Amino acid sequence: MIRDFLRSRAFGLVVPLIAVAFGLIAGAVIMLLSGNNPIDGYSGLIGGIFGDMYYFGETLRAMTPLILSGLAFAFAFRTGLLNIGVEGQVIVGWFAAVIAGISWDAPGIIHLPTALMAGALAGALWAFVPGILKAKLHVHEVIVSIMMNYIALHVVNSLIRGVFLDTGQRTAFVPDSASLSSEWLQGVTDFSRLHWGFLIALAAAVVMWFLLWKTKKGFEFRAVGFNQNASLYAGMNVSGNITSSMSISGAFAGLAGAVSGLGTYGYIEIFNTFTNLGFDGIAVALLGNSSSIGIVLSAFLFGGLSEGSGNMQAAAGVAPELVEIIIALIIFFVASSYLIRWIYKRLDSIRKGEK
Amino acid sequence: MDLFLIILYTIVPAALISATPLLLTAMGGLFSERSGVVNIGLEGLMVFGAFSGILGTLFFESLGFGMLSPWLGILTAAIIGMIFSLFHAVASISLRADQIVSGVALNILAVGLGVYITREIFDAGQTPTISARLFRQDVPLLSEIPIIGDMFFSRVYPTTWVAFLLVIVVWFVVFKTPFGLRLRSVGEHPAAADTMGINVNRMRYIGVMLSGLFGGMGGAIYAITAAGSFSGGTITGQGFMALAVLIFGKWHPFGAFGAALFFGLAQALSISAQSIPGLQDVPQVFMLILPYVVTILALAGVVGRATPPKAMNTHYEKGSR
């Protein structure tokens, strides 16, 4: 019994680790095929993550929104919903937080929380649409949320262009009272852009774990994710749970945008294309097996990969897009865990056969 | 009245041009989704099609194929798109990956791989511009019909008419041939199809590969006619738009045809609304989001209900009930 339990717990780790290994090996093969030296490439990459405190601070900075967008996707995923709309929710959250930051003045203790709340609320509202359509009309949330992504992009861009443009393509900077930037964190990390949002993201990971696993509501969310009919029979409000799960997921996503806007950049600019924070969040959540700890770890991996890619290009001349290829392949391998399980089972049965 | 006609003369050809890549890619999505495999990866297939279409055109130009090069480029994109779609097929059919997740991965992979190879070859994030372009032509005879001729058959890319003909071919293949019946049966009730001796996974592989073929062509045609080169920003959302076309068109070739024209019209309007009396006061953003809002309304049942193939997004395991 205990051995089986250990084995299943361990197995939860085996799949993502093998997927990461496969992804990195495939990346090495691609480097070889394109005439680059994989050892140089990867040492450049690692140097770009751990090389000095600045790089490390930037890695933590890069993983901050990824934790939150990963939590967003994972939260909906636990309720059986695929929130592909994280990207759009990040954009509206970013926008709302920055606007709440620049449009009025207040002491920091009120200003910053309201700006963050505005971001979370905007994200929640954006996710509410696919949620309610799924709950009431059984419309597939994936398509609606994809459409909502584009609506977010165009609406936010045109609002920035028409109303909030300050200089160039961006809005004014948020005042210090609404800013997440921290001189102390910057000082510790050799003046990277690391900001308080990092701690907010870690706290959010704890919140998600608590909400899902330690509260009655969380139990209902997970129950609906496992089996809607059984949940309905047990007297749970399935459509209500779908809507609120989607909205909470959107709130995490909105927060991911808010910490980028209030922490890293201090403004929002007209987006030529998607931020990719939301789409990368899907990868983070999948690799992290939709658990809080897993998400923090995989956000570190993906944040590190995308931060380190700059140094990889500078040190070894490998195009930074290699990292995107690796991320895509890791998702493929995680999603295709059937293959890994199958190989594992075969090996297991061969071993037992020999006994 | 004259003014109205002049507006139509500019808007309609522009709408036809923007509709073409959407329509072709949606035909690809139709094959895949009718066979029961969701294809969020249409975007990635278009990206890779745009990449290989431009690369193919440049290659055949350098060999001296001249004006034939863009056509050969489109053909290259179709073949490479088909091969590239195998990623989605292997993961979501053989390895039972979640079809939506696998599609998302395909989209990331396409941009990454396309731009990576571009950088390796050209040392820049963007390919050179192709010199052998397709040109807007009048369709012989038809363009001489009064009014309609000027509107629909003048100054259009030949690819538009190839695409329209392909829609009829797709309709015939899907609804009038044994192959089409098998494809649809696999997407509706794979177990029943299996008992009739149809190889479910084989049909699904064909469905996904056809989506790669058409998606590749769609991306290539967009890149060759509208962009002229490839970079990471060439295809931004056209693939998702094609998915919307497919859904709004209720997974039917002719429905998708109408939807593509509507979306093309919305796109053409968003570009040239400023010069149209009565529309110049409408903010551009409304035109930009119109297709997406309409798709949501369509799904919600406001504009007629869209019901997907029944077995979509499920894996088929032999012997399971």
Image: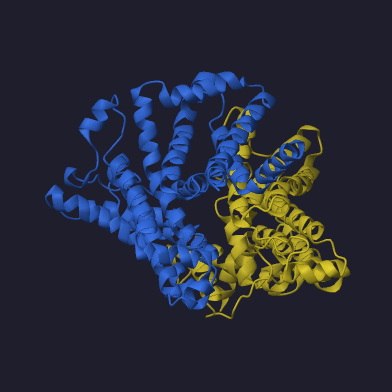
Chain colours: A blue, B yellow
- B295 to A248, vertically: above or below: below
| Residue A124, position as x, y percentages in the image | 36, 62
* Quadrant of residue A331 within the rendered picture: top right
Q: Can residue A250 be seen in this snapshot? A: no
| Residue B288, position as x, y percentages in the image | 48, 63
Name the residue nearer the viewer: B49 or B268: B49
Residue drawn at point x = 41 percent, y = 21 percent: A51
Q: Can residue A351 be seen in this snapshot? A: yes
Q: Tag count in the figure?
A: 0
Name the residue nearer the viewer: A12 or B278: A12
| Residue B52, position as x, y percentages in the image | 70, 42
Name the residue nearer the viewer: B255 or A341: A341
Q: Which quarter shows the N terminus of chain B?
A: bottom right
- In the figure, is residue A250 to the left or right of B228? left
- In the figure, is residue A67 to the left or right of B189? left
- A21 to A233, vertically: above or below: above
Q: Which quarter shows the C terminus of chain B?
A: bottom right
Furthest residue in direction left, as rendered:
A107
Residue drawn at point x = 72 percent, y = 59 percent: B28
Residue drawn at point x = 21 percent, y = 53 percent: A113
Name the residue nearer the viewer: A16 or A136: A16
- A250 to A57, vertically: above or below: below
* Quadrant of residue B12 within the rendered picture: bottom right
| Residue B182, position as x, y percentages in the image | 83, 68
- In the figure, is residue B8 to the left or right of A47? right
